[in-house]
Amino acid sequence: MTKTLNIALAQLNPTVGDIDGNLGLLRDARTQAKEMAADLMVAGELVVSGYPPEDLLLKPSFIDAIESKILDFVRETSDGGPAVLLGAPWRDDGKLYNAALLIDGGAIVATRFKRELPNYGVFDEMRVFEAGPMADPIDFRGMRLGVMVCEDLWEPAVAERLAAEGGEVLVVLNGSPFDVDKKDNRFDLARARAQETGLPLVYVNLVGGQDELVF
């Protein structure tokens, strides 16, 4: 039997620092995804904090608030609706990561941490985040999801590892701002990873803007 997975992409316009407002956007999007009979809703990189959160990440109270409010949101997913794969700052063993959290049935069922941290131009993620390890796919409702966060897509070895470990679809959470030729570059990268691995690829970005960045 052919496996199917209905995925809703929530390309949202978060506000940096507005945790409640950003989770409100996610709640509204999940309601729509539920009406569409989606199995999984995917949102962008650091959608809970807004992107880029910069020095807010150095405030323990900000990270505490994110974790507390995400756990409130997690409990709401016990309603039988779609699972949610979202981006957020997340602590693990005392280290802070740019994370993708898979939330389903009232629990965080998997976490994956961004490996390729950009450190050029407007990006300084090495200053505030730890780089994640090479990760295996996530088992989800009979499908194996190869989850990547933004610049992980740029490094062929990340997708190759996910495919080698049995990934069946690549899912990429992005907070990728616009610049000249960026659209073509994104298509080229996505196409290359799909061709190299032979896997379908799902790509979700943020929309809107933050300071001088436009998504």
Image: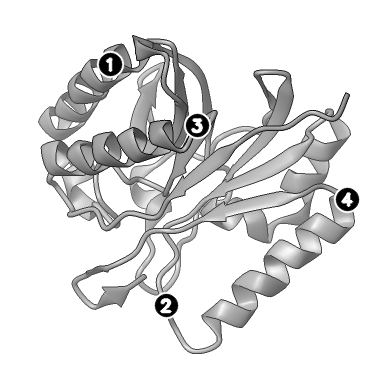
Q: Which residue is mark 4?
A: 198
The structure residue drawn at horizontal position 19% and vertical position 50%, both measured from the top left corner, is 55
Q: Amino acid at mark 1?
A: Glu
The structure residue drawn at horizontal position 46% and vertical position 26%, both measured from the top left corner, is 82
Q: SS of the residue at dot 4?
A: loop
Q: Which residue is mark 1?
A: 76
Q: CA distance from mark 2 to mark 4?
A: 28 Å
- Closer to the chain start, of discs 2 and 3, is 3
- Closer to the chain start, of discs 2 and 4, is 2
Q: Which mark is residue 37?
A: 3
Q: Is residue 104 above or below residue 32?
A: above
Note whether residue 45 is visible: yes
Where residue 98 sits in the image (x, y, percent)? Answer: 42, 40
Q: Amino acid at mark 3?
A: Ala
Q: CA distance from mark 3 to mark 4?
A: 27 Å
Question: Around disc 1, counting alpha carbons within 10 Å, would you say few (fewer than 14), some (14 to 19), or many (20 or more)?
Answer: some
Q: Which residue is mark 2?
A: 178
Q: Is residue 211 above or below residue 161?
A: below
Q: Is residue 123 left or right of residue 150?
A: left
